Amino acid sequence: MNTLFDKIWDAHVVTLIEEGPTQVYIDRLYCHEVTSPQAFEGMRARGLKCFRPEKIYCMPDHNTPTHDQDKPIEDPVSKKQVDTLAKNAEEFGLTHYGMLNERNGIIHVVGPERGLTLPGMTIVCGDSHTSTHGAVGAIAFGIGTSEVEMVMASQCILQSRPKTMRISVEGELKSGVTAKDLALYVMSKMTTSGATGYFIEYAGSAVRNLSMEGRLTLCNLSIEMGARGGMIAPDEVTFAYLEGRENSPKGADWDQAVAYWKTLKSDEHAQFDKEIIFEAADIEPMITYGTNPGMGMGITQHIPLTDGMDEVAKTTYLKSLEYMGFEPGECLLGKQIDYVFLGSCTNGRIEDFRAFASLVKGRRKAEHVVAWLVPGSWMVDAQIREEGLDKIFEAAGFELRQPGCSACLAMNDDKIPAGKYAVSTSNRNFEGRQGPGARTILAGPLVAAAAAVTGVITDPREMMKS
């Protein structure tokens, strides 16, 4: 009796090294501009070519500005990284989707939407949020730069086999609760180290009822619990999402692929190293109050007190709250915010923009709020315009920016100033993540929309009633 992870992993084992790591074949390597330069340099120094260049896809996303992409990048470091990726891809004969290419965007958004990410694959990238791709039923995980070079040279990687964990969320999500809220809730219970050493399979009725975009959001955040990656068994939702995509199989190949994909599920009595069950009914819209993604709470709740903490934990906890300017026991409803960011590989898909638009339609952005609405790809940008969401945003006082990682991390122009509060749909709220001294409150697209309109932290369910 095998788990979904076991089935895919075992199908990709090349060599088992006794009392050592496993050599695993990799179906897809994604490269962006930040973690690939040294890998290419290493290949060049050893006189190597990429073993299977057709399996490697490159695109800039972290350093790309989200405005004036038709002009040279002003920041010299960002420009050098973006230009270097283009040169390396050309030299090594790799597919490269540069800025303004219709296939460009955040690599973890583009992979699934272009059908490059498929069930049963092994997928790696020099980026921790590669776990996103596991949502289609793949083994996907982030790797270091030396490992990027290893895959370039051999299309294989040496890895220790992780343990397996199944997290089931049963029941139906309440109105106003998104996949991001589900993920933040699970993280708040698991903590940022609760899944260390494990590969997670998400299951249960609440997970099965998520859209493909919602599943991508959930798997994206697996790494924030310390997990090696996260995955969801492919089903009719997966197949409907992938059918007809640019790189998905076609015709008889599609039928054959789906027949195989239907076998990719954990056997009925498969044994996991750990099983955890949550109830969907317990989840409300979530926000974070600290400086790691596990410090989250329901939006109507109060910041936990220090009761029961040992001195070390208490000191760390209070330091985090001090950075955020919060106090134990405080409720954050009504707290004034300064910035709102909708986007990133966590919430930069069309469904996220639909959710945001549903709440801001017929309303106006709060005057003091700076809002960055950043599509995860040019395909998402096109969908926004086709559906007229851009008109809704414009009427409400919002401006749509160009695709990129944007304010998820301070590697481009979109930085939150020191001391300012940002309600962000991204994945990390570490100190300085969105800019030196920036204060990040992680949330889903509905909570972000409510904050953008009211100028304060607001329960979106209250606005959904009116």
Image: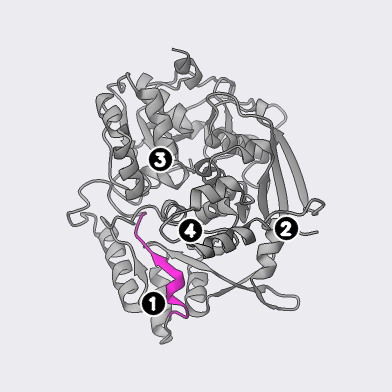
Q: Amino acid at mark 2?
A: Lys
Label 2: which secondary element: strand
N-terminal-most mark, 2 or 1: 1
Decide whether residue 56 is among the magenta residues.
Answer: yes
> Of residues 233 and 438, which is closer to you in this image?
233
Q: CA distance from mark 2 to mark 1?
A: 34 Å
Q: Considering the image in quadrants, where does the C terminus appear?
A: top left
Q: CA distance from mark 1 to mark 3?
A: 37 Å
Q: Amino acid at mark 1?
A: Glu
Q: CA distance from mark 4 to mark 3?
A: 22 Å
Residue to which mark 4 is pinned = 127
N-terminal-most mark, 1 or 3: 1
Residue found at x 42% / y 83%: 49
Label 3: which secondary element: helix
Residue to which mark 3 is pinned = 350
N-terminal-most mark, 2 or 4: 4
Query: Bounds of the magenta span?
Result: 50-61
Q: Amino acid at mark 4?
A: Asp
Q: CA distance from mark 4 to mark 1?
A: 18 Å
Q: Residue furthest bottom?
A: 47
Q: Residues within 10 Å of mark 2 (few under 14, many from 20)?
A: some
Q: Residue furthest top?
A: 466
Between tags 1 and 3, which lies in front?
3
Decide whether residue 104 is among the magenta residues.
Answer: no
Q: Is residue 222 left or right of residue 41?
A: right
Dots 4, 1 in contact, CB < 8 A: no
Between tags 4 and 1, which lies in front?
4
Q: Is residue 230 visible?
A: yes
Q: Amino acid at mark 3?
A: Ile
